[in-house]
């Protein structure tokens, strides 16, 4: 497995997924960023920032803004994936259930 510690970051992981210096795995925070990228039609999050700057922005509490084509219910779900404490974030099962609910709306 590639990790941040050994300097080899998987390119497909979003900037927000490298905040902690632990082995890179898919987390619910990454799921929120992935949803944001889909709703933004593949736009790179904070393209003007370097990785260390993104970390600073997130640590200050800033989050990605709602894409113009993103329904409010989906953005609200994304936002819950970005809460500071991982234990406060929805599980993947909850994310799936809420996406199904959003789809039914």
Image: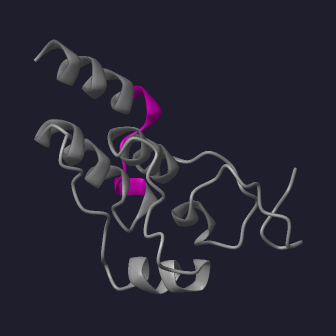
Q: Residue at x 72, y 55 (%)?
A: 11
The foreground one among 1 and 46 is 46
Of residues 2 and 97, the one drawn nearer to the viewer in this rendering: 2
Q: Quadrant of the C terminus?
A: top left
Say if the magenta span includes residue 92. yes
Asked if 97 appears above or below 69 in the picture, the reply is above
Q: Nearer the viewer, residue 48 or 85?
A: 48
Residue 77 lies left or right of residue 53; in this view the side is: left
Compared across the picture, whether 15 is left or right of 93 comes to right
Residue 103 lies, with reference to residue 10, above or below; the image says: above
- Report the label total: 0
Name the image quarter holding residue 59.
Answer: bottom left
Q: Position of residue 15 (x, y in %)?
A: 56, 65
Whether residue 33 appears in magenta in the rendering, the answer is no
| 102 vs 13: above or below | above
Q: Residue furthest top?
A: 104
Residue 71: x percent and y percent?
A: 15, 37
Q: Position of residue 95 (x, y in %)?
A: 36, 32
Q: Residue at x 40, y 82 (%)?
A: 57
Residue positioned 47% across, 77% down in the render: 48
Where residue 67 sits: x, y (%)? 24, 50
Q: Is residue 51 left or right of residue 79?
A: right
Tell me where the magenta segment starts and ends, as one range.
87-93
Of the pair 27 and 85, the residue shown nearer to us: 27
Question: Which residue is painted at 27% across and 54% down in the image?
Answer: 79
């Amino acid at each position: 497995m590639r990790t941040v510690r050994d300097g080899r970051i998987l390119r497909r992981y979003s900037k927000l997924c490298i905040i902690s210096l632990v082995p890179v795995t898919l987390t619910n925070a990454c799921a929120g960023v992935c949803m944001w990228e889909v709703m933004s039609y593949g736009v790179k999050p904070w393209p003007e920032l370097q990785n260390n700057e993104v970390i600073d922005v997130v640590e200050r509490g800033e989050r990605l803004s709602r894409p113009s084509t993103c329904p409010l219910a989906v953005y609200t779900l994304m936002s819950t994936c970005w809460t500071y404490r991982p234990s406060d974030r929805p599980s993947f099962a909850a994310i799936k259930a809420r996406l199904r609910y959003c789809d039914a709306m």
